[in-house]
Image: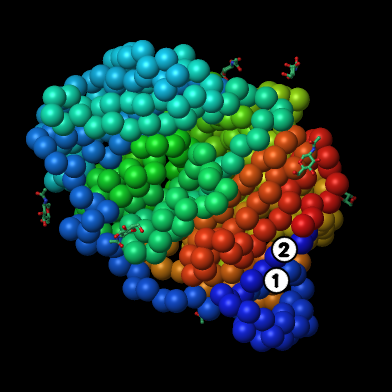
Amino acid sequence: MGSRSSFAPGSSALACCLAALAIFAVLCDGGTTSPFVRTIWPSVDMPFDSDVFATPPGYNAPQQVHITQGDHVGKAVIVSWVTPDEPGSNRVRYWSEKSQKKRYSEDTVVTSYKYYNYTSGYIHHCTIKDLEPDTKYHYVVGSGHVERQFWFVTPPEVGPDVPYTFGLIGDLGQTHDSNVTLTHYEQNPYKPKALLFLGDLSYADDHPLHNNMRWDSWGRFVERSVAYQHWIWVAGNHEIDYCPEIGEYTPFKPYLHRYEVPYKESNSSSPLWYSVKRASAYIIVLSSYSAYAIYTPQYQWLKEELPKVNRSETPWLIVLMHSPLYNSYNYHYMEGESMRVVFEPWFVEHKVDVVIAGHVHAYERTKRISNIAYNITNGLATPDSNPNAPVYITIGDGGNIEGLANNMTEPQPDYSAYREASFGHAIFDIKNRTHAYYAWNRNDDGIAVEADSAWFHNRYWYSVEDSS
Ligand SMILES: *[C@@H]1O[C@H](CO)[C@@H](O)[C@H](O)[C@H]1NC(C)=O
Ligand SMILES: *[C@@H]1O[C@H](CO)[C@@H](O)[C@H](O)[C@H]1NC(C)=O
Ligand SMILES: *[C@@H]1O[C@H](CO)[C@@H](O)[C@H](O)[C@H]1NC(C)=O
Ligand SMILES: *[C@@H]1O[C@H](CO)[C@@H](O)[C@H](O)[C@H]1NC(C)=O
Ligand SMILES: *[C@@H]1O[C@H](CO)[C@@H](O)[C@H](O)[C@H]1NC(C)=O
Ligand SMILES: *[C@@H]1O[C@H](CO)[C@@H](O)[C@H](O)[C@H]1NC(C)=O
Ligand SMILES: *[C@@H]1O[C@H](CO)[C@@H](O)[C@H](O)[C@H]1NC(C)=O
Ligand SMILES: [Fe+2]
């Protein structure tokens, strides 16, 4: 698979990069290890009084507004927001740009939780159903003089040749790097319409007592994007918030209260794993931190789920999880191995196009490889080129408080096509049932620079080698 690499802004760097490439070609078994050296910012969260965390003015004004897909096919949306002082209005007023006719939804769940000595605000999740496809809607939350208005565009009707552009961000956190990643994402020239978020949202748990005020500040930080477009959520390890030392025994408590997903619509028994259809894509979300071995609910669900995917309806089969199954960094090395052993044969059997993960705070893209031949006694324990296998992308490089993962296993393994320790984000731009264009942007470059890119050829419809 080809990749276009530009190692530093400006052409003066070209000659030395070519030299670096030549050296790497000698040393490496695999693809490209980028020698790009990023600027170092301190890995600290932006202070609470930063502009990005400002609370909207007015008593009990709704904040942390976010939306996600509300059903299996994209005709519903879940609008969520937090009111700090009292429950306030349950209602979302909305209208389509076409008809202007005002409607209301009161299909709202209001919840709150305590975490050690923190008490959350009133968290609202309102489902709006029966939306028109590919239509701009305006919506209003709050009441009286603290009404706040936003808008979103519904996805087009599900279908095999519907073009659609996804953004990819993982492990975002709330540092200055996080802000640069989000800003780049907003400026992306492909204008991504929905974001696949690969887990690890706020990193509140890196603060004493898992300071849940960092969950609130994160919600305010990302509102500028997620109030206007659907973010599809994946749970990471920083969502677990299990902390027996302070009496917090319920895994995923803050995350599950704050982020609702349409899991029942895909017959899942848990919001931690579910699926949605969107345009020409079928998106399966898995949980690296829930049981997945044989006989467990997640195993059983996925086993029944994969055969249901109709590639004539949704050609692009995309699997999301937090912990990567292939990762050649010396961070979280082989943490995804037990899930790989269980699920990889299914991914190959069902011709999954791409598996996207976060967790490792760096970037990597693999070739189409599988490691499913091994049967304990035959010694075939090496990843092998396999045209039915997915490409694995690790994009845990949102830029969080824990800093960058820059220690790689050497030499670069054969299966790894491109890896680089930089913060950034990517887009997955589906053109039609056969072609999708993929591009990764590093924060240190202008948004126009695609540091890594590739054409994906659909595994079901056009199973030829990917290329550039
Ligand atoms: C919770 O406890 C910590 C440590 O004792 C303290 O610093 C913090 O102010 C408390 N927070 C609240 C909301 O009481
Ligand atoms: C975050 O980025 C936005 C958009 O670029 C900018 O307006 C804002 O000042 C930044 N805030 C911080 C704290 O870096
Ligand atoms: C949903 O899951 C249950 C339990 O696994 C199963 O019995 C049922 O057939 C499933 N329904 C559909 C529509 O797949
Ligand atoms: C798969 O989707 C196509 C296109 O929507 C439809 O014609 C076909 O009946 C579906 N197949 C099954 C088994 O549902
Ligand atoms: C493992 O593979 C070897 C070599 O193909 C074969 O001889 C052996 O029977 C296999 N073992 C099992 C348990 O399938
Ligand atoms: C990189 O990771 C390896 C394996 O964990 C370790 O032995 C080595 O010391 C690390 N190198 C640096 C520079 O931290
Ligand atoms: C699908 O998109 C690719 C890339 O834009 C294009 O080359 C190809 O002709 C398209 N296929 C069809 C059937 O339109
Ligand atoms: Fe993680």
Image quadrant for the N terminus?
bottom right
Which badge, 1 or 2, comes first in the chain's sequence?
2
**In the drawing, does residue 245 fall left or right of residue 157?**
left
Q: How many marks?
A: 2
Residue 240 visible somewhere in the drawing:
no
Residue 85 visible somewhere in the drawing:
yes
Q: Circle 2 — which element?
A: loop
- List the residue tagged with mark 1: 32
Q: Residue at x 46, y 57 (%)?
A: 184
Q: Residue at x 72, y 63 (%)?
A: 3
- List the residue tagged with mark 2: 3
Q: Quadrant of residue 207?
A: bottom left
Q: Nearer the viewer, residue 221 or 170?
A: 221
Image quadrant for the C terminus?
bottom right
Tell whether circle 1 marks a residue whose Cβ is less than 8 angstroms from ligand 6: no
Q: Residue at x 72, y 36 (%)?
A: 432
How far apart, in angstroms, are the residues tagged by discs 1 and 2?
Answer: 9 Å
Q: Are marks 1 and 2 in contact (CB under 8 Å)?
A: yes
Q: Nearer the viewer, residue 113 or 374?
A: 113
Label for residue 270?
A: none
Q: Nearer the viewer, residue 206 or 160?
A: 160
Q: What x and y, as percent, mark residue 113?
A: 22, 35
In the rendered image of this protein, does residue 94 appear above or below residue 155?
above
In the rendered image of this protein, does residue 168 appear above or below residue 329?
above
Tell whether circle 2 marks a residue whose Cβ is less than 8 angstroms from ligand 7: no
Q: What x and y, as percent, mark residue 274?
A: 53, 30
Q: What x and y, as percent, mark residue 218?
A: 30, 49
Q: Residue at x 67, y 45 (%)?
A: 354
Badge 2: residue crowd in 10 Å (few <14, some 14–19, many ≥20): some
The amino acid type, in three-letter code, at marker 1 is: Thr
